[in-house]
Amino acid sequence: MSKRNAFSAIDVGIALVIVAAIVVAAVALLQTRAPEPDDPAEAPGAIDPALICYQETGRIDVDLEQARALAVGPEGNIHVAGDKSVRVLDSSGAELLAISLEEEPRCLAVGGSAHEFPGRMYVGSKHHVEVFDADGKPVASWPSLGEKANLTSIGLAPGNVFLADAGNQTVWHCDTSGGIRGEIGKHDPQRKITGFIVTSPYFDLAVSPEAFLHVVNPRTLGLEIYTFDGTLESSWRRPETTIEGFQGCCNPIHFALLSDGRYVTAEKGRPRVKIYDTGGRFECVVAGPDQVAEQAADVAVDDADRVLILDAKNRAVRIFAPKQSDSGETSQ
């Protein structure tokens, strides 16, 4: 073997050793990487008790294997959808009504006292909406929104119904008979609307008494506020790793509005329910992983501004109210 060939063989051997070392290091790095924000392996971490401003004050058991949606109707009755049914319960948990459905419900809204038909139920399946009166009698079955549709939330206002559609990444603006008036939130540079980015079946909305439509833009980790004609009024985002913000692919997954316009938000990845003010600034925690071990299936607010959390794992509606100090004042 020539000297040149010998050196070449040595060089190749050294190169192979270096490559092998790099591969071993890369594998070790991958195995010890920090988990993504939504990874189940990520420990949620302790929440400062001083930040928790609510306490659990009640619990209503729900006989559903897979509870999916929650709403509060007139007189404080609690509506829960799941297992191809809607159950209506009074404040003590006694069942007042059970409605059988042909398809699995995905979302639910109930007309309040200001609605044209108080107690009317709008139940969203994957592609369309079924409507029932307060006694559970069928009123209408709206047309399908197409095979791509994936309805995830329903919001009501006098004369208006809004449907969040994760499949089409849009909000359908409908009349109370199901006729489509238009779409809200589609990409429109002239109106400075970037468009919703929905990469999972979590896409929530709510209507405020001031006639504004609040919609989660999941991938941006925030909310957008629209007028009913589709004008973007404002928005807020909280892509932060601290308790004050949201992380992961698509949070918050659910939210509800308190009577003064503040937000109750629920997250996945790190299961916690929090309060934000009307401008999107963090205020406090309703419940963390120590109180609700898995992500909420839905959240709602009753007439007393108590927070209701649908705990599907434990088949219960968990009721939380603001803590009171020794002087009797609430912690908010």
Image (cartoon, rainbow, N blue to C red):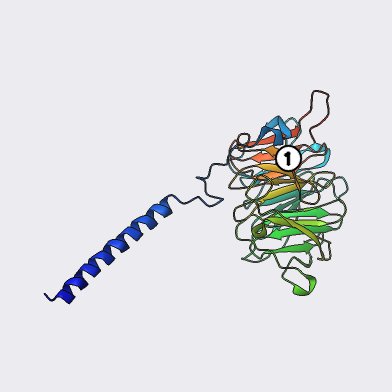
For disc 1, the marked residue is 284
Q: Quadrant of residue 93?
A: top right
User: Where is residue 146 drawn, in percent x and y?
Assistant: 65, 66
- Within the image, what quadrant is residue 169 found in? bottom right
Q: Residue furthest top?
A: 326
Residue 24 sits in which quadrant?
A: bottom left
Count of all numbered marks drawn on residues in the image:
1
Q: Residues within 10 Å of mark 1 (few under 14, many from 20)?
A: many
Please indicate, yes or no, whether residue 111 appears anywhere in the rendered image: yes
- Quadrant containing the C terminus in the rendered view: top right
Q: From the viewer's side, name the closer residue of 148 and 216.
A: 216
* Rendered view: 32 above or below 229: above
Residue at the far front in the pictured view:
3
Residue extending farthest to the left is: 1
Q: Secondary structure at mark 1?
A: strand
| Residue 219 relative to residue 32: left or right | right
Can residue 141 be seen by looking at this rendering? Answer: no
Q: Is residue 2 left or right of residue 126?
A: left
Which residue occupies 77% across, 38% down?
77
Residue 119, horizontal then vertical, whole percent:
81, 45
Residue at x-position 35% and y-position 60%: 22
Residue 27 position within the rendered picture, expressed as x and y whole percent measured from the top left: 38, 55
Horizontal arrangement in the rendering, residue 31 relative to residue 195 (left or right):
left
Q: Quadrant of the N terminus?
A: bottom left
The type of residue carrying mark 1 is: Cys
Question: Is residue 151 or residue 56 the one in the foreground?
Answer: 56
Image height check: is 16 above or below 268?
below
Residue sitting at 43 percent across and 49 percent down? 32
Q: Residue 128 location in percent, x, y?
A: 69, 59
In the rendered image, the vertical position of residue 271 relative to residue 250, given as above or below = above
